[in-house]
Amino acid sequence: MPGNSDVASGGVAFNEILYASITPPATVLTNSSSVSTYTINGILQGDCIDLYPQSNLATSTTYLTVGAVWCSAANTLSVQWVNSTSASSSGSPTAVPCVLQVTRPKLLPFGYKNYPTALE
């Protein structure tokens, strides 16, 4: 039978580890968040991305935390920085060395809304 005979599933096309040095925003107001974007060549919308900082965020980002991470466009990583403290973060934050785990689903060409919604 011609063509691919794989059953459409939530399988993984590949899983890669990348390094990136990202710098948080200079200011995030108290009890709020801010989204910053970074160029990471090769990532695509629908990729599953995990971010693993390799240094203490409390000292390098003036107490910001990571709220969410996603690929907002091809080659564009979006990171939501959250300030849950009683003071605005400010100053010149240092770059944070990070390891990114990028998992690309087999169904990525069909859009993430076509991923399975349950385990079978």
Image (spheres, helix red, strand yellow):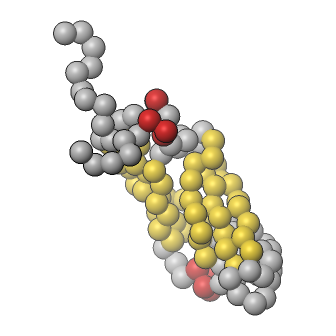
Q: Nearer the viewer, residue 71 or 96?
A: 71
Is 26 on the left-hand or right-hand side of 69?
right
Task: Give the residue at the far top of this rendering.
Answer: 2
Return the x and y of residue 111 as percentages of the image width and height. Answer: 50, 34
Q: Does residue 104 sit above or below 26 in this rendering?
A: above
Residue at point 27%, 19% (across, down): 4
Please tell me whether residue 35 is drawn above or below residue 112 in the rendered image.
below
Q: Position of residue 24 (x, y in %)?
A: 69, 69
In the figure, is residue 81 to the left or right of 27? left
Residue drawn where x is 60% and y is 39% of the image: 74
Quadrant of the rendered image containing residue 96:
bottom right
Q: Is residue 68 above or below residue 59?
A: above
Image quadrant containing the N terminus: top left
Query: Going 33% across and 41% down the picture, which residue do you hit?
Result: 10
Marks counted in the figure total: 0
Whether residue 27 is visible here, answered yes or no, is yes
Query: Considering the image in quadrants, where does the C terminus appear?
Result: top left
Whether residue 13 is visible to the viewer of this picture, yes or no, is: no
The residue shown at (53%, 40%) is 44
Q: Tell whether 87 sits left or right of 97.
A: right
Q: Nearer the viewer, residue 12 or 20?
A: 12
- Asked if residue 3 lies left or right of residue 41, the reply is left
